[in-house]
Amino acid sequence: MLTVFGLDGIGEITAGDDLGAIIAKVAAGHLENGDILLVTSKIVSKAEGRILRAADREQAITDETVRVVARRDYPGGVTRIVENRLGLVMAAAGVDASNTPDGTILLLPLDPDRSARQLRTALREWLGVEVGVIITDTVGRPWREGQTDIAIGAAGIRVVDDLRGQTDASGRLLMVTAAAVADELAAAGDLVKGKTSGRPVAVARGMAHFVTEEDGPGARALVRNAERDMFRLGSDEAFAAGFAAGRAAGAAAE
Amino acid sequence: MLTVFGLDGIGEITAGDDLGAIIAKVAAGHLENGDILLVTSKIVSKAEGRILRAADREQAITDETVRVVARRDYPGGVTRIVENRLGLVMAAAGVDASNTPDGTILLLPLDPDRSARQLRTALREWLGVEVGVIITDTVGRPWREGQTDIAIGAAGIRVVDDLRGQTDASGRLLMVTAAAVADELAAAGDLVKGKTSGRPVAVARGMAHFVTEEDGPGARALVRNAERDMFRLGSDEAFAAGFAAGRAAGAAAE
């Protein structure tokens, strides 16, 4: 059985706050060994001081961008889907302007896997519990309406449950099944945390079999290498690149 | 609080089985008003007799395909990512060869939203409970390793929690947030059902605020129209189409 519940009482987080101590305080008496803590990246960013003036938003997106994947212009602006320095493909590079103090924007944590490891260590030291930690963020997806939460940082958790080589109930080999456990946990957490509740931390219980002794590779292991990705570039962008190459090839052939 | 637990005792499903009656039997005493039933599409397909000979797999994929989105050839085969007749973009059109009787494959249910509505009605009639129903399937995703479960059918559930127009904790308007609730519930269910357990049905409790009186538009509402999708075509396929168009344009310009 999986149980997911929110932790109340975290309050507003500002730059320099000791997030591990703050979460430990509200989690005292509520956390057990084998629990998985689901932490909205927004409060990690705030504690780490990853805050900028809203006027600098476009420049911030550019700075966070490694590679533009797709863009769409509309009257008054542009949507950029980019691969950011964490390898995550996200609208606006993950730069966030909601639930931030007026006139400010938030960047993603500098290294969410490290942030997760630090929170894990803090909870061990404050509360004496061995838990997994996932840092979550909200993303859009190709082909589907609506957003879901995914894991952008993780520590002490098997982020992918690789079943390849195992057999199904009828003894047949499972060929391609590797469940993105950390993303599924992040999604479950979003159902409890919500976007309007001001409750940025939840606990998932009953999944101790995914909690590991070592911190592990983190959520970075969930990022697919762009070279292996059939959707590494937006359809319009790929068409335009092909068109230019075709035109040049046609001219050269003359 | 969200609780997700599996229902045991469903056993092997074969064509013609009354799935509503079978689920009602194992769910008796375990279901409450406001629960959401998460049903793996595989057993719906089996009950509906959506089974073919494995030898006919490639033809079956072709028959289920509305539009090829991307393909990749490898020694001994081809992976086709396609939009199927349900509007879902999936590898092999969702045609499944795992957890099926030897020498057979399974097609997706003919109309998973209808299947969900029928199960909902059956549970109301057998057990007198008002629940939501989600039919789930497992999919790969661009940019991310590992698969997650999504909702391919739904009844009696608000599949997207549209927060646009609402305000966040600091009173600021939420601009682009619409949570794909049914997909997040499907993901949570996968954590409990697993792929090797032979436990194809789970119950999500604590989310009654997403359960609706009417059956609603179903999971079809989670399908984004391809014309609005920045990733409606694979990068290689879009490049090739652009190249051909560019070459022709270059030739015409000479």
Image (cartoon, coloured by chain):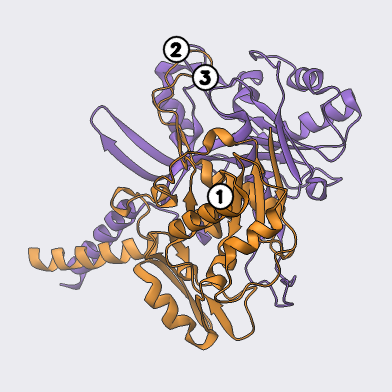
Chain colours: A orange, B purple
Q: How crowded is mark 2: few (under 14 residues within 10 Å), some or many (20 or more)?
A: few
Left or right of B127? Residue A130 is: left
* Residue type, label 2: Gly
* Residue type, label 3: Asn
Q: Residues within 10 Å of mark 3 (few under 14, many from 20)?
A: many
Chain of the residue where label 2 is placed in the rendered structure: B
Looking at the image, is A64 positioned above or below residue A140?
below
The structure residue drawn at horizontal position 45% and vertical position 54%, both measured from the top left corner, is B232
Q: Position of residue B21 (x, y in %)?
A: 80, 18
SS assignment at label 1: helix
Looking at the image, is B179 positioned above or below residue B88?
below
Q: Judge if badges 1 and 3 mark residues of a common chain.
A: no
Q: Judge if badges 3 and 2 mark residues of a common chain.
A: yes
Q: Determine the CA span between mark 1 and mark 2.
A: 51 Å
Which residue bears the numbered disc 2? B103
Looking at the image, is A170 positioned above or below residue A38?
above
Residue B181: image tag:
none
Left or right of A10? Residue A53 is: left
SS assignment at label 3: loop
Q: Which is nearer the eye, A136 or A27? A: A27
Q: Determine the CA span between mark 3 and mark 2.
A: 11 Å
Chain of the residue where label 1 is placed in the rendered structure: A
Which residue bears the numbered disc 1? A124
Which residue bears the numbered disc 3? B99
